[in-house]
């Protein structure tokens, strides 16, 4: 009888060690670590890092050995005050539950704020502290308010409006455009050579002095940089692998081609010295991620070649030697060769569907 009472007391004691009042299991009995947190993108203007983690778990954010902050996950979400971090900073985030089980860490890098992307509120809309209608309302944005996009969590956009930064449902935002596209100015008219209606023309008939050695045009370079950056934002990788060439460099190239293929054949794809657009510093040859298509007609069928053909004029460039226009330009189809004219003229040439010679009404001599 005494043994049965002793065993019952022991069993009762064991139960007390693994249960709380109300039937809840003590944290000490939990041996399963929390799942890896889901962390939202972080920009260099962000004051906090957010994401999803096991409810009631403590979530920590570290940059190297430096602790940036911690917070308890509530209703499956967390928000940690991290202050502003530099672009490229790696932030490691992990969760620790009530039983002190540590989960796997998630590392994210701080990205540059895409300040060029803006939205307008389509009505009076609440800006909240988190990506949920259950979070605190920070302010009410009146209809028409322009906000700067930072990142997104599901259908919620993290935005900045004046001194406020918070989350707004994307259902109440529309992309905003000032209606004033970025303009790329026409090149300088100081380059020696033949001008037709104010445009420098360099081809088989019209050349430039052998002494002219300007390097790449600063305006053309700016346009090329903007073009490459815009393509990258759309998942297109472009490389400007050839730009300025001196008279002597072009002479060496042409001589080499002529010795290999003969002058008649070389003239179809290589300019004679003094007649290359590359010597002006205004011509760029572009290639895509697959170098096997560089300097080949097949480049025109790649996604990079197609993107260039559709968008280069926005940054001041035109396709100089289109397909089927060999009799006009004097050169075979080169989907990689683009000439800088400035965005205003480039748009007009693009819309005309003509070569530069046809647009300027210049016939071969």
Image (spheres, rainbow, N blue to C red):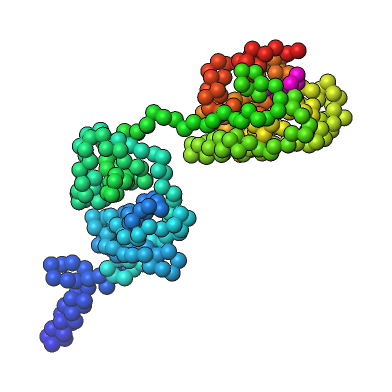
The picture places residue 337, in percent across and down from the top left corner, at 66, 29
Residue at left offset 60%, top offset 34%: 220
| Closest to the observer, 156 or 211 | 211
Q: Measured along the vertical axis of the image, is residue 263 above or below residue 8?
A: above
Quarter of the view holding residue 173: top left
Q: Is residue 303 left or right of residue 364?
A: left
Residue at left offset 28%, top offset 49%: 163
Quarter of the view holding residue 26: bottom left
Q: What is the quadrant of the N terminus in the image?
A: bottom left
| Closest to the observer, 72 or 308 | 308
Q: How many marks?
A: 0
State yes or no: residue 227 in magenta: no
Q: What is the quadrant of the C terminus in the image?
A: top right
Q: Is residue 24 left or right of residue 326?
A: left
The picture places residue 292, in percent across and down from the top left corner, at 68, 36
Q: Measured along the vertical axis of the image, is residue 35 above or below residue 135?
A: below
The picture places residue 77, in percent across and down from the top left corner, at 28, 55
| Closest to the observer, 329 or 55 | 329
Q: What main secondary structure does the magenta stretch of the protein show?
A: loop
Q: Residue furthest front?
A: 190
Q: Is residue 92 visible?
A: yes
Q: Measured along the vertical axis of the image, is residue 134 above or below residue 269?
A: below
Q: Is residue 307 visible?
A: no
Residue at left offset 25%, top offset 70%: 27
Highlighted magenta segment, given as a residue range: 201-206
The picture places residue 233, in percent across and down from the top left corner, at 48, 39
Quarter of the view holding residue 81: bottom left
Residue at left offset 27%, top offset 40%: 169
Q: Is residue 192 left or right of residue 176?
A: right
């Amino acid at each position: 009888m005494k043994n049965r009472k002793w065993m019952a007391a022991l069993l009762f004691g064991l139960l007390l060690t693994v249960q709380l009042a109300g039937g809840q299991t003590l944290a000490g009995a939990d041996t399963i670590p929390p799942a890896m947190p889901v962390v939202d993108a972080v920009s260099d203007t962000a004051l906090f890092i957010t994401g999803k983690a096991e409810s009631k778990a403590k979530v920590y954010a570290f940059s190297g050995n430096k602790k940036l902050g911690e917070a308890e996950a509530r209703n499956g979400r967390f928000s940690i005050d991290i202050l502003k971090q530099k672009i490229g900073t790696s932030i490691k985030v992990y969760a620790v539950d009530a039983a002190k089980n540590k989960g796997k860490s998630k590392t994210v890098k701080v990205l540059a704020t895409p300040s060029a992307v803006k939205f307008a509120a389509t009505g009076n809309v609440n800006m909240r502290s988190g990506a949920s209608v259950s979070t605190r309302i920070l302010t009410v944005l009146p209809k028409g308010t322009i906000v700067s996009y930072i990142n997104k969590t599901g259908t919620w956009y993290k935005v900045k409006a004046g001194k406020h930064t918070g989350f707004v449902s994307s259902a109440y935002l529309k992309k905003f455009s000032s209606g004033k596209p970025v303009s790329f100015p026409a090149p300088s008219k100081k380059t020696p050579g033949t001008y037709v209606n104010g445009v420098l023309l360099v081809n088989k008939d019209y050349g430039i002095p052998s002494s002219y050695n300007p390097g790449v045009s600063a305006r053309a370079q700016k346009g090329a940089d903007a073009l490459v950056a815009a393509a990258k934002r759309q998942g297109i990788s472009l490389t400007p692998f050839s730009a300025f060439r001196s008279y002597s460099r072009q002479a060496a190239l042409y001589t080499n081609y002529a010795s290999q293929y003969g002058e008649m054949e070389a003239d179809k794809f290589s300019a004679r010295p003094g007649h290359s657009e590359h010597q002006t510093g205004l011509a760029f040859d572009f290639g895509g991620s697959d170098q096997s298509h560089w300097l080949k007609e097949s480049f025109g069928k790649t996604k990079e070649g197609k993107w260039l053909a559709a968008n280069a004029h926005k940054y001041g460039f035109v396709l100089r030697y289109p397909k089927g226009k060999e009799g006009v330009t004097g050169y075979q189809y080169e989907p990689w060769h683009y000439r800088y004219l400035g965005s205003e003229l480039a748009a007009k040439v693009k819309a005309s569907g003509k070569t530069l010679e046809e647009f300027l009404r210049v016939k071969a001599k």
